[in-house]
Image (spheres, helix red, strand yellow):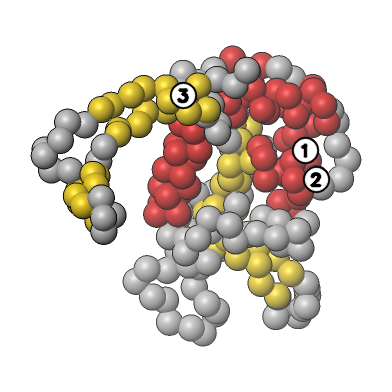
Amino acid sequence: MKNIKGDTLFQKTYNVDYLTKWRAKNNGDLPKFYYKDTHPEIIDKNTWECVQLEFERRAVFIKEHRMNKYHQHSRELSFYGKVICKYCGHTLVRRESNRTKDKGDYYWCCKRYRAGRYSPVEPESCCNGIRINDAAPAEMFIKVWDQLVENKEWQRSTNGKGVLEKYRLAELIRLKNSMGIIDKMAYVLMLKTLGNIKIGLDGRVAVIFLAGAKVNI
C-alpha cells in the first residue's frame, strides 16, 4: 500500500450557473474544506528537502564564484567549474600554452589572471599565476579518493546535522564501499561526490567533497 501524503484545499472555485457551467473563484461565498494526506506521495519528504537545499547550494556556489551556470563540465572537460582559485574565488580555465618550452600543451589557470606579459593589468585581475597541467585535476581527485577509501578519519569531521549533509555523507560512504580504490578517472563518481578543488597562491591544493570532507594535498 502506498503512503498517503499531501494537503488539498477543496472548493476553491464553484459552479455559478449549472446551465452555462461557468465557474467563479470562491472568495468566501461558500465554505472551503482543507484535507491533509489526500493523495499518494511522488517522493518522500527528505528527498524533496534535499533537492530544494541542493538548488540553494548551487545558487550560492554560482554567485560566490561568478559563474554563469553550475554545470559547465562534460566528459571531455570534466573539471570545468570545479577548480577554484583560492585567492579571488573565480574558476580556473583550460588554456593552450604559447610558451616556447611547452607550446601547444594545455594547462589550467585562474580566469582572472592577467592576460599576458605585455597586456595591461586590469583592476579586477588576479595575481594567482599558478599553472597546473591538464591532467592534474583528475590526478588530484584519484589521489584524494583513494585516501578516503584507505583512511576513515575524515568521517569524524563530516557528520552534518542537516538533511542534505546527512544524505551526502551516506552517499559518499556507500560509493566508497562499492567503488573502493580507483586507478583512473571516474567521471560519474566525481560528479556525485566532488564539491570543488581550490588552488592557492603557493600552489597548495584543497580537495573538498560535497559531504564536507576536506583533504589538503
Task: Say which amino acid is labelled 2.
Answer: Ala
Residue type of the residue flagged with mark 1: Lys
Which quadrant would the N terminus be assigned to in this image? top right
**Residue 5: numbered disc:** 3
Residue 186, label in figure: 2
Could you say which is closer to the camera, residue 129 or residue 79? 79
What residue sits 17% from the left and 31% below the top?
Answer: 31
Q: Nearer the viewer, mark 2 or mark 3?
A: 3
Query: What residue is rendered at 86% in x and 36% in y?
Result: 182
Task: Determine which residue is flagged by label 1.
Answer: 143
Q: Identify which residue is drawn at 48% across, 83% down.
A: 119
Q: Residue at x 55, y 20 (%)?
A: 3
Q: Residues within 10 Å of mark 2 (few under 14, many from 20)?
A: some
Gap between marks 2 and 3 measured at Cα: 38 Å
Task: Spot the residue most to the right.
Answer: 183
Asked which secondary structure carries label 2, the reply is loop
Residue in front for this viewpoint, 29 or 40:
29
Q: Is residue 41 visible?
A: yes
User: In screen coordinates, is 139 left or right of 52?
Assistant: right
Query: Which of disc 3 and disc 2 is earlier in sequence?
Result: 3
Is residue 131 visible in this depiction of the protein? no
Give me the C-alpha separation between circle 3 and circle 1: 45 Å
Whether 107 is drawn above or below 204: the answer is below
**Hey, which quadrant is residue 97 in on the image?**
bottom right
